[in-house]
Amino acid sequence: MDASGDGVGDLAGITSKLDYISALGVDAIWLSPFYPSPMADFGYDVSNYTGVHDLFGTMTDFDELLAEAHSRNLKLIIDWVPNHTSDQHPWFAESRSSRINDKRDWYVWRDGAPDGGPPNNWMAAFRRAGRAWTFDESTGQWYLHSFLAEQPDLNWDNPEVEAAMHDTLRFWLDKGVDGFRIDVAHKIGKDPGLTDNPADVEEFTALDPMRRHDQDWPSAHERLAAIRRVVDDYPGRMIVGEVYILDLERLMDYVNASDELHLSHNFVFLHQPWDADAFRKLLEGMEELTSPEAWAAWFLNNHDHSRVATRYGPHAVRAAALLVLTLRGTPFLFQGEELGLPDAPVSPDQEVDVDGRDPERAPIPWEAPSSNGPGAGFSSGAPWLPITPEAERLNAATQSEDPGSTLSFYRRLIRLRRQTVCLQSGSFELLSSPKEGLAYVRGEAEHRMLVVINFSDAEVCFEGALAGLQGTARVALATDPESRPHEVDLRAVPLSPGEGLILHL
Ligand code: NOJ
């Protein structure tokens, strides 16, 4: 939400929408980076870890947002970007100034290969960025950047870097933030020998990650444990890592480690096709690999990926929400997901992101454009990205009034979760079900809920008897807005295409 009218969302805008966020029923907000930044990667290129970019407001605006969030019992989690800074950060300016500067070793500088090329074959995560190395004419060496050349990697092998970064955490912890989302947490440990990756390694693929030298090195775990110790000096704080590893076993090393991150985002989950069997296999795999103390972090939408309404299609929106909000673990939602927003079409002349992620980042339409103008209540100015053409139907104001809307569904679903202990912390058991669907039970003894979801576009029938269930159960929530509370006979529970139900057993 843009309060200043410059077309870009800002901190005061978020504060003005806290009542909306509260009404949704969530417990916490995660803010993407709002620090001073040249914005080569929309704030993930930080030039000052302890400031606020004037595009987003002032430190006073931040303090106000934090206080207003807390007064509504909402926690505030902020994004922390430890792997790299901006090339405009004063640390990097010093580091690149000469080979003998005190901060030279704060970044990763190397001589080129004998053939004059970069020191090794590591590639940047963004395809358009190419190699992960850039040559610096003035000092005649190459520096490492896992993302853009404007995002040089910090050298976490240098204890001074680690200490300085810990101080940036303490700055925000002292202010009272409730925790951090740690950007590319698995990248703060790399092979200090800078050994080549096998030639076929691509970013974000499941190719045997054991063989990668540019991330997920054992030192990442030690460093996350040290970060946890900093955070644990402050009561009640939480760290969630962006652990972008698509190999379940490697990912589970982060989920299971009880003295590192509290939570690790599960990207394997997000990468599943909309197919019940795929999700079943993944959930079974996780069950096998999860230690009793581990706690999952589920999500199907974020600012780096096509939204569910586009990736899977509008028919999947409610069923996907039901899945994310009833699994055992902590669900994360992305702004506008609760409205069922699709990706916005962005023409080449409107593109601003280097990696094609504009469509999912388009602003929330707060009001109908017909009543509020082309900015749809997001901005009185020209929005930084186009508003979805479906804003007239999908805006927050219209959906708030409509009990059959996606927004009303999300509100009911989150309320049910908040009121139902077994959906929050009860055990999880997958049941046998038709291959087009998923069925699972949350909770134990007297307090159990059954969740059934039909992923397909045909009717399927869940047969409770095959899964050991008998008698009848009362529907607590259905994806179908027309459905009224009713009892179903568990011998045969018919589900229409894309339908999901939560039932009291
Ligand atoms: C992951 C963030 O989610 C993404 O938006 C960013 O571009 C990269 N990390 C680099 O910081």
Image (cartoon, rainbow, N blue to C red):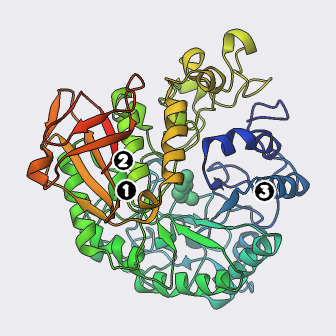
The answer to whether 163 is drawn above or below residue 14 in the figure is below
**Cβ atoms under marks 3 and 1 closer than 8 Å:** no
Disc 1 and disc 2: Cα gap in Å? Answer: 6 Å
**Cβ atoms under marks 3 and 2 closer than 8 Å:** no
- Under mark 1, the amino acid is Leu
323 sits left or right of 200 in the view: right
Q: Dot 3 corresponds to which residue?
A: 36
The quarter of the picture where residue 249 lies is bottom left
Instruction: Residue 370 in the image: state x and y as whole percent.
Output: 68, 9
Q: Closest to the observer: 485 or 35?
A: 485
45 sits left or right of 406 in the view: right
Q: Secondary structure at mark 1?
A: loop
Q: Residue furthest top?
A: 370
Label 1: few (<14), some or many (≥20) within 10 Å? Answer: many
Q: Secondary structure at mark 2?
A: helix
Disc 3 and disc 1: Cα gap in Å? Answer: 37 Å
Badge number at residue 327: 1
Q: Closest to the observer: 165 or 326?
A: 326
**Cβ atoms under marks 1 and 2 closer than 8 Å:** yes
Q: Dot 2 corresponds to which residue?
A: 323
Indicate yes or no: mark 3 CB to ligand 1 under 8 Å. Answer: no
Q: Closest to the observer: 6 or 413?
A: 413
31 sits left or right of 242 in the view: right
- Under mark 3, the amino acid is Pro
Q: Secondary structure at mark 3?
A: loop
Disc 3 and disc 2: Cα gap in Å? Answer: 37 Å
Q: Quadrant of ligand 1?
A: bottom right
The quarter of the picture where residue 71 lies is bottom right
Q: Closest to the observer: 268 or 16?
A: 16
Q: Residue furthest bottom?
A: 159
Can residue 194 be seen here? The reply is yes
